[in-house]
Image: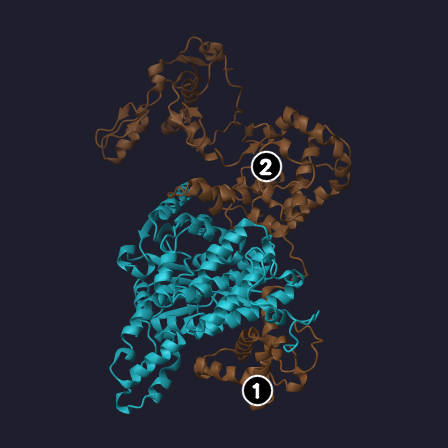
Amino acid sequence: MADDEIFTQNPINGSINPPFAKKKRSLPGTPDPEAEVIALSPKTLMATNRFLCEICGKGFQRDQNLQLHRRGHNLPWKLKQRTSKEVRKRVYVCPEKTCVHHHPSRALGDLTGIKKHFCRKHGEKKWKCEKCSKRYAVQSDWKAHSKTCGTREYKCDCGAIFSRRDSFITHRAFCDALAEETARISASSHHMNNHAPANMNFQFIGASSLGPTPCMGQNFPPIFKPIASDNTNINAVHIRRGLSLWNMAQNPGQTQDYTPETLEEMHPLGINHVSLVTINNFSTHDSLITHPCSNTPQVSNFNHLNWDFGSKLSSNNGTQDLANDQSGLPLSTSDIKDVSVPSLFSTQHQIISHQPSSATMSATALLQKAAQMGATTTDPSILGKFGLNSNESIITVQENSFGQVCGASSVSSELVSAEENGLAALKQSQMHPSKRHRMMNDEISVGETRDFLGVGIQSLCQPPSINGWT
Amino acid sequence: MIQEEGSSSICSSPLQKFSMMSFSPSPGSPYPWLREMRSEERGLCLIHLLVACANHVASGNVENANIGLEYISHLASPDGDTMQRIAAYFSEALADRMLRGWPGLHKALNSTRIASVTDEILVQKLFYEYCPFLKLSYVITNQAIMEAMEGEKVIHIIDLNCFQPVQWISLLQEMRARPEGPPHLRISGIHEQREVLDIVARKLNEEAEKLDVPFQFNPLVCKLENLDVEKLRVKTGEAVAISSVLQLHSILAADDDVLWKNSPLFANSPNAAHLRRVLQMNQQNLGDFVERDGTNVCNTSPDSSSSSPIPPAVSPNMATFLNGLLGLSPKLMMVTEQESNQNGLMFMDRIMESLNFYAALFDCLDSTMPRASIERRRIEKMLFGEEIKNIVASEGVDRKQRHEKLEKWIPRLDLAGFGMVPLSYHVMLRARRLLHSYNYNGYKIKEENGCFIICWQDQALFSVSAWRFRRRSG
């Protein structure tokens, strides 16, 4: 039981289950009136590791911890026991005279708490965050901050940055910059009326291409109400953003003109922001490959339509990157960061944006068609018309291909020989027409009457009623 | 009709029109009717012209080839539709090949080129970004690694071309989420540029620290064919996984040189002289020839006593390389390669194969990126264009892009001592899920004998296969 008493002073692990009900945490600076007030000097508060082990030199803040450590070295150890039987609550005051907590009535109940308080308020800020310029006096504060710094950021258009969603929303509700913008686009509110449902649709379009729809649907924030003509409402802006993303999906090829950094440069409709890949900011810990769906916080981020326009993946920045990099190596980190850990969604936008016109045949289809045309014997293609001196060219072709040992498809070889004809004939055709005429006649009389395509002379004499290509 | 020169045949075909025009075009817009041509016609025309031109180049007929290129230049354009773009790059490659016939000229034109590593890396990243192939390869590789390394405590991964950290960042995250906890992970990245490896190292170290995974990155700066396996410092007890994404085929290039030296070509026999002449005419290299026609060469030799059977084409460099990797006893080796036979065939067949292959790739880009996109142009010019140039114009050791189909890789790897590991159902699931999530339309993944083939509209483009150490090669 003696050991238990010692531990109850510092309920570190909470391993002791008090028989009484767990005490609630009271407001800071409202101590128990019955408690014993302890005033420690600044030196004591800031002191760390005063107790040193003689064997390994490890430092401890409390003598008891050192004693326990000495057991590990097989050294004699002695744990002090609590002198008095009754438990007296201790509260601590801050030694700094100007501090609120200096007075016993505003003492803090926890030793660690008072230490941290002293460092934070009256201490030197020795720990600095790498990414931003924040400084901290307490190491644990610094660690906690650096874990979240830059990982999730909400940026308002006015430039304010928030790490918490709620504070961001609150800010936006009152932000001046937004009010300006909404006033400006109120003129085109009738457009928005028509497209407001599109905003909802957009969310689901986005969802369907991102993964299971329920993910998105659930996190659809209540703020996105379809708006009729509420100009001052920020929803209008949200819708416009949603609209622009939606528009962008419909308007391919407008990626070139993207430059804006401010609201002023954006048009109400047809906004060209490919980089409304605001999503880019989530990319720092979105792996390209893992799915966001299972990870709800990330999905909700998407709904927030982060307004960061600094996407490096936009086409404009593509050129900028190159321009910057021509000075040579090393590659700047930002480039790699943005290009090597791309967000899932940026590519998705790219894909949605371009819809090839159905009028143009794909290259593979063209190749297949060309191969077919070369192979068919009855198709009076253009090549047939050039197949006059076919025999000669066939022989040369065969010599060159050395017995056609290789596994070329018959189709392509026919195509090859067809082409041999075509160009040879082209060359011929540049000669004087009369000469050509004579040559043609000679050849017709000499050799066989059929060209390699099996098209006879008779068909050659027919007028070219067929285009030859279709 | 040809006889009717100068006839106003309204529906005459384009090639006819070419023939009717005088060779020297009039100043100003030479062929105004070109605009009237529908894109399909123009595409077909381009194909025919390209093939014809290639034929002439192959046979050394420079005059005709020149004319062909001239015609192509009026129709092709790197900013036009897919076929026009393809034609532009192929005609450039053909021109490059022709130019090599004048070595002095070729060297002079290419001597002041600025090789920018930044650009090369950037375009690789663009390719990764806009096409799903690399993403799929990474996903499949990672999933296969996760499955193979279940229960392993110390894992050593060797990346044969480590230029971006995405794949490994994702793997670190997956490792972290393992039920048995993250292993001790070592990644050895190979690349020719130290700076690239430094950046990858930093990114990976940051990620590992964030995720609290014991991690170590070893950069190895060297050319892949000069890889010294000892430098990888694989320790006993480590489970080794090797990831090769589009890298193995370049090793085949080094063998070209070797085969030439050991060939009967340099022997002093009439057989050799005959061979040399034949090969020169054909502009082939010996490697291809021997592989294909080993037996024929024997049979055609007049001197029967000296006709020792030429052994099947063993590529010594490749064998050494694979042997070195095998020596690490890898638990898993993931090989991603282009699925196309653009090596070891005759020139014309290389042209046709690569036309089909790159047509599909250009179509892929066309389906996802707008025409005006500068990134698309970059990928087309700096990645595909350079590969096409390499395939068409280079020969011998320089021709690094020696793509081969799985049907050739499988026996090669098998002979080297690797055993194929069929890729599991879960890997396929993840790969398909990736395609769906990105809304990539038109791409398909097929499974064939345990390997995956990534296709675009039924045209096979890339293959991914898994291998493991099976036995000492013999």
Chain A, colour shown: brown
Chain holding disc 1:
A
Q: Quadrant of residue A24?
A: top right
Secondary structure beneath label 2: loop
Chain B, colour shown: cyan
Residue type at mark 1: give it: Asp
Residue type at mark 2: give it: Asn
Foreground pick, A412 / A219: A412
In the displayed structure image, the side of residue B105 where residue A458 appears, left or right? right
In the displayed structure image, the side of residue B60 where residue B129 appears, left or right? right
Q: CA distance from mark 1 to mark 2?
A: 78 Å
Which residue is tagged 1?
A: A442
Residue at 32% across, 50% down: B218
Mark 2 Cα-neighbour bin, 10 Å: few <14, some 14–19, many ≥20: many
Foreground pick, B276 / A465: A465
On the same chain, marks 1 and 2? The answer is yes
Asked whether residue A254 is in view, the answer is yes
**Mark 1 or 2: the one toward you:** 1
Q: Quadrant of residue A62?
A: top left
Which residue is tagged 2?
A: A306
Q: Residue A81: image x %, image y %? A: 33, 23
